Amino acid sequence: MSNISRRTFNRKLTQGMAGSALLAGMPWACGMGEEAQERKLGIALVGLGSYSAGQLAPGLVNAKHCYLAGIVTGTPAKEKQWMEEYDIPKDNVYNYENFDKIANNDAIDIVYVVLPNSMHAEFCIRAAKAGKHVICEKPMAVSVLECDAIIEACNAAGVKLSVGYRMQSDPYTNEIKRLVREKTFGDVHYVSSDAAYISRGNPDQWRLNYALSGGGALMNMGVYSIQSNIYGTGTNPISVSAQEFSTIPEYFKDTDESITAQMQFPNGVVGHMFTSHNANANRLFVNFRRGWAELNPCHSYGPLAGRTSEGKEIKYPHQSQQMVQMDDFAKHIKTGSTNFAPGEMGKRDMIIVEAIYQSIKEGGKTVPLDLGNMGIVKS
Amino acid sequence: MSNISRRTFNRKLTQGMAGSALLAGMPWACGMGEEAQERKLGIALVGLGSYSAGQLAPGLVNAKHCYLAGIVTGTPAKEKQWMEEYDIPKDNVYNYENFDKIANNDAIDIVYVVLPNSMHAEFCIRAAKAGKHVICEKPMAVSVLECDAIIEACNAAGVKLSVGYRMQSDPYTNEIKRLVREKTFGDVHYVSSDAAYISRGNPDQWRLNYALSGGGALMNMGVYSIQSNIYGTGTNPISVSAQEFSTIPEYFKDTDESITAQMQFPNGVVGHMFTSHNANANRLFVNFRRGWAELNPCHSYGPLAGRTSEGKEIKYPHQSQQMVQMDDFAKHIKTGSTNFAPGEMGKRDMIIVEAIYQSIKEGGKTVPLDLGNMGIVKS
């Protein structure tokens, strides 16, 4: 069975099926649990850039709890291509103008907003108003105010909201969380996290355009470093200081090229992060009282790799992180299981992002944070 | 041959020999080059604390170009013990009062000052005035002014000066230097270095006493992080900012517990360092344009370990770092070979240390540095 025909088959089957009689007779359905035999939720991707095309849509092909049901794009040429590739009916194709009509489309349960950062708030709010559950790609927005507006819109509409934090469902990340939670090596003392890649391609990319991105490296990979500092300690920071480094301002005209930041945590843990659009580093190091754990790479699409001071390799079978993330959110909607990346988490990270930019503006001054347990998810 | 008897044999042999006739007939001398057959230089250790007892004296046992010839101690009880253990004649034993008489002792070529930091300057200067070559343990002193005074005293006396930077002679360090110098993976973009250990033993140790140490973690392991940032980039920083973290001030009463610092380098490289007396981390990560190299552990007594992004292990036979360091300095004295850790290097690092403390005092402000190539050694 080719990929395309299998997608078609899956979609038709899961959309139309009333029970499990048919599935039970299919050889490839053997071993599927009860959950998988429930209806798959339909996801519409808003914005068909490289992340949707290269990660989300392929990730959905093998998802158990959701599937690619629709698309929303401002590029008409992409419509036909995607409809063919993923067997999407014309009725489930929207553009940015007629997007609100998605409210009337029962095939769409979840809207995943994958647009440039400055457009997240508008489309997440429109999706919520259309009665759809929302996944908002990270960073959640370009300001804390916008995060609040998204959260309020979802609450008002009674829909679920998640941020596109693929790492929060990842088994490597979860192993780090477990080591922290269970104090396997004692208390955490120090966390260091790097999330950087060399982004020197198209100078017209939206990430380099402040009006669209709201910031550079920090708004892109930086939020992963913030996240891994937090799950690497199990707590929110109580203060942050930061520095910006600019070496080719002619290329990084109005977005940050490289940023370092230091976080203090309530239990005395020191956290460090580095993010850059002009260096490669993708690591998490957690130092415990009696040992350490390390992931490298840590925030890439995988396969990830890790090890501990005991010489033990941290290793899991590689799966699409995006598939697992979207399946986790679909399960949350269907069963009330944990939402691993709720809106409050995205808002908290944006508070830290704003504090980092404030510290840089104030010459590296330490900025206090009063986050309580905002966005801390017990897993 | 037991350790002690072999030490005795070595000492007597090398002290007394005029040529290589005897050596040539000894089975364990086979394969020794011409250099090794020259006279070994006599080293006197000043200060017989744990570093002298645990690292330097044992390291000297198998050194090829120098040997433990004398001791200087303020603790009479140690005299007998060391004389027996290392076969040191009474004539080569001094205390802090009669130390200057070492000028008349031809058995002592080099004085290695291993005292608390605040005593380095006094004893290095006295050693220079006594006409002895000097190794000053790191950090070189407790101020740049003191570094200047040591350098001037050595220049005036016409003696050689080196700082106890064991890493500068280490093959792992040199492999990093080679990768940087030869641009094996392209230009360096980012360096991150941690040098920290949990130092929670005796609260009366001199390292916790500001008057003796001149500072805490930064003055102890921190200078290694400064060093590895510099050899990890091949250049001196042009600015530095820093933050201090204090979680148990009742223990770390007047010395820094944890410090993070960020360095900017002239070619746009970003450097980060973390040092602590209350966390364990001992790593160097160098990110190049097309790959990375990592040492972990990086600044410990070894065995060290390292790897590159190509999956290649960095691995060398383990040797006493201190032995290699002191042999390199003895060779420098005897043959004019490179001094891998000259006084200028120690002074440069103290300039950076003072800038780090200044930045902390000024709330994290970036402090400019004008170091040129000070202390950069081509190897």
Image (spheres, coloured by chain):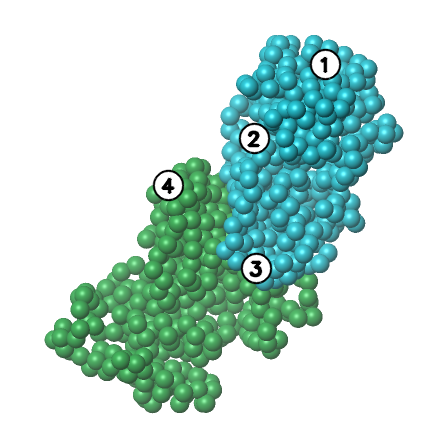
Chain colours: A cyan, B green
**In the depicted view, which residue is nearer to us: B206 or A93?**
A93
Tag 2 and tag 4 share a subunit: no
Q: Which mark is residue A291?
A: 3
Taking the spot 24% from the left edge, 67% from the top edge, the residue there is B334
Say what amino acid the circle numbered 3 marks: Gly
| SS for callout 4 | loop
Horizontally, residue A132 falls left or right of residue B33, namely right
Quote the CA–CA distance across marks 3 and 2.
39 Å
Residue linked to disc 4:
B183
Q: Vertically, is A86 above or below A364?
A: above
Taking the spot 53% from the left edge, 23% from the top edge, the residue there is A202
Which label sits in the foreground, 4 or 3? 3
| Whether residue A143 can be seen here | no
Which label sits in the foreground, 3 or 2? 3
Q: Answer with mark 3 or mark 2, whichever residue precedes in sequence.
A: 2
Tag 4 and tag 3 share a subunit: no
Horizontally, residue A123 falls left or right of residue B22, namely right
Which label sits in the foreground, 2 or 4? 4
Say what amino acid the circle numbered 2 marks: Phe
| Whether residue B257 can be seen here | yes
In x, y percent, where is residue A151?
A: 81, 33
Q: Determine the image quadrant of residue A184.
A: bottom right
Q: Which mark is residue A252?
A: 2
Q: Answer with mark 2 or mark 1, whichever residue precedes in sequence.
A: 1
Q: Chain of mark 4?
A: B
Horizontally, residue A66 falls left or right of residue B197, namely right
Quote the CA–CA distance across marks 4 and 1.
52 Å
Q: Answer with mark 3 or mark 1, whichever residue precedes in sequence.
A: 1
Q: Chain of mark 3?
A: A
Tag 3 and tag 1 share a subunit: yes
Taking the spot 46% from the left edge, 57% from the top edge, the residue there is B298
